[in-house]
Amino acid sequence: MAALFKTPGQEKTENLPEATIRKKTIYSFSMFVLFAVLFVVGWFWLRGQPSKAGKTSAPIRAVLNTNESIFDGLLSDNRLAKEYPLSLAANPARVNGDLGLKSKFDTANWAMQVILAKGDTMRVSLNDIKKLPRTEIVFNFKCIEGWSQITHWAGVRFSEFMRAYGLNEESAKKYLGLATPDKEYYVGIDMRSALHPQTILCYELNGKPLPLNQGYPLRLIIPVKYGVKSLKRIGYMYFDNNRTPDYWADVKGYDYFSGL
Ligand SMILES: Nc1nc2c(c(=O)[nH]1)N[C@H]1C(S)=C(S)[C@@H](COP(=O)(O)O)O[C@H]1N2
Ligand SMILES: [Mo]
């Protein structure tokens, strides 16, 4: 306090003996060198830590895993992503990422293939999906690359789809998996986030069918996660108690959870 608020009469500077000044200088400089060395040693230690196939090193991964469990704990049904008025929605909306969208695609014969817990496959058409209650959302879509955009989507709640098709055993699994029809892009999502009320199986953008490059006929929209998880053009849906494969987490070592 004394240093911050000088009271009159305290302006007089201290006159320390030479020896004390020298001692203080040596001490400060030693501390500086010590921390510099610790930093460099720590840095090389981190770099030298084992990491799985060119991915994030183990100690950093450990920190990320802790972050993940914190975010996981924060997420619940009553923690909703902020919604916006329709007038703020971007039109046209930005297009980003075309993994799994480049292969030849037979639009007429598309059906989502749902691999059930018992192992059999159920085919669900776009018309089947459209028969379910329609819901809309305008939210701020956030990409991990550093951009965000308010966008307007419509479809059916994932939770409603699961309920309508009686997929109770599947909903009880810990993870959902989605893949494009050519299996080039795939995401894994914890079931709690999948069943979140704002997660939708989406077939419309700005009131129109999804454009091909934005996931026609059906994509995921999951506002509680970064954009990477909103897989465009669902070909396959599956369920597991272990983490389902995830393109960015498996290939690049991104956070599996990618929660917001
Ligand atoms: N099939 C597929 N889905 C995808 C991607 C992709 O490359 N392929 N990119 C993801 C990423 S990183 C983002 S940010 C969003 C972008 O969605 P948009 O193109 O509708 O803006 O899609 C996600 N879903
Ligand atoms: Mo993204």
Image (cartoon, rainbow, N blue to C red):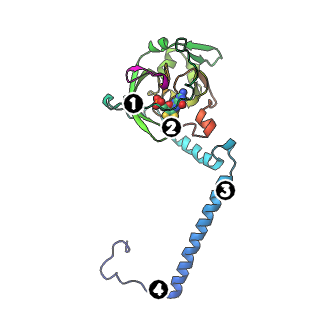
Q: How far apart are marks 1 and 2 (CA)?
A: 19 Å
Q: Which range is magenta? A: 203-213
Q: Which residue is drawn at 66% across and 17% down?
A: 119
Q: What element carries label 4?
A: loop
Q: Mark 3 or mark 1, which is nearer the start of the sequence?
A: 3
Can residue 6 be seen in the rendering of this structure?
A: yes
Q: Which residue is drawn at 42% across and 37% down?
A: 148
Which residue is identified by label 2? 259
Q: What amino acid type should be assigned to the residue bearing mark 2?
A: Gly
Splitting the image into 4 quarters, where does residue 249 fall? top right
For label 1, the crowd category at 10 Å Cα-Cα, with few meaning under 14, some 14 to 19 and many 20 or more, is many
Q: Mark 4 or mark 3, which is nearer the start of the sequence?
A: 4
**Mark number displayed over residue 16:** 4
Can residue 222 be seen in the rendering of this structure?
A: no
Q: Is mark 1 within 8 Å of ligand 1?
A: yes
Q: What amino acid type should be assigned to the residue bearing mark 3?
A: Trp
Which residue is identified by label 1? 151
Judge depth for marks 1 and 4 and give the one in front: 1
Residues at discs 1 and 4 in contact (Cβ within 8 Å): no
Q: What element carries label 3?
A: helix
Q: What amino acid type should be assigned to the residue bearing mark 4?
A: Leu
Which residue is identified by label 3? 45
Residue 84 on image: x %, y %: 34, 32
